[in-house]
Image (cartoon, rainbow, N blue to C red):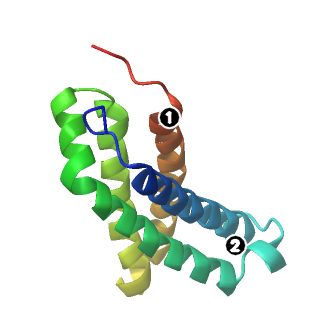
Amino acid sequence: MSRLGKMPNWQRKFVIIGMMTCSITGLMYLLGHQFQIQRTTLGTHSILAAHGVAAMLATLALGSVLPFHIKAGFLSKRKWLSGFSQLSFLFSLLITGALLYYGPEEFREGVISTHWIIGLMFIGIFLLHLLVPRKSK
């Protein structure tokens, strides 16, 4: 690794695949279940289960970057907004995801909306963080 905070290739692929798989399956379920687009295909329990498994992998990917990449990014003062926005969104998605599964029924509708709105914002900020070139000092 030549740059501060640059992930090894295997880790970068793991993070991208984990986050994108979770995002895509979540988007598929959102389109099928909430917006009734191809409901019989996209709004199924299988898609929701795939999203849950992908969320577990994405959480592992997040855990793999916490000790080094996030600390190095903080110290380098580069991509702070997109990096810490992602971290905040992921934390919120973990909390709302847990509330969807374990939370009280009376909060469910509000939590569903919150979860998918934050999820859509996360996809955008993740792609921004991934694709916008890093500015050199």
Residue occupying the far top of the picture: 137
Image location (x, y in percent) of residue 72: 20, 39
Given residues 91 and 128, the one toward you in this image is 128
Relative placement, left or right, of 43 versus 115 is: right
Please say if 112 is above or below 83: below
Q: Residue at x 47, y 40 (%)?
A: 125
Image location (x, y in percent) of residue 59: 37, 67
Within-10-Å neighbours for mark 1: few <14, some 14–19, many 20+: some
| SS of the residue under disc 2 | helix
Per the rendering, the mark at residue 33 is: 2
Given residues 94 and 131, the one toward you in this image is 131
User: Hey, what amino acid is under mark 1?
Assistant: Leu
Closer to the N terminus: mark 2 or mark 1? 2
Image location (x, y in percent) of residue 106: 41, 81
Per the rendering, the mark at residue 78 is: none
User: Hey, what amino acid is under mark 2?
Assistant: His
Residue tagged 1: 128
Within-10-Å neighbours for mark 2: few <14, some 14–19, many 20+: some
| SS of the residue under disc 1 | helix
Relative placement, left or right, of 45 versus 51 is: right
Q: How many numbered marks, from 0 up? A: 2
Relative placement, left or right, of 42 versus 25 is: right
Residue 104 visible at all: no
Image location (x, y in percent) of residue 20: 56, 56
Q: Residue at x 66, y 86 (%)?
A: 45
Q: Quadrant of the N terminus?
A: top left
Residue 132 visible at all: yes
Task: Say if mark 2 contacts mark 1, CB within 8 Å.
Answer: no
Query: Cα distance, mark 2 to mark 1?
Result: 27 Å
Q: Residue at x 19, y 36 (%)?
A: 74
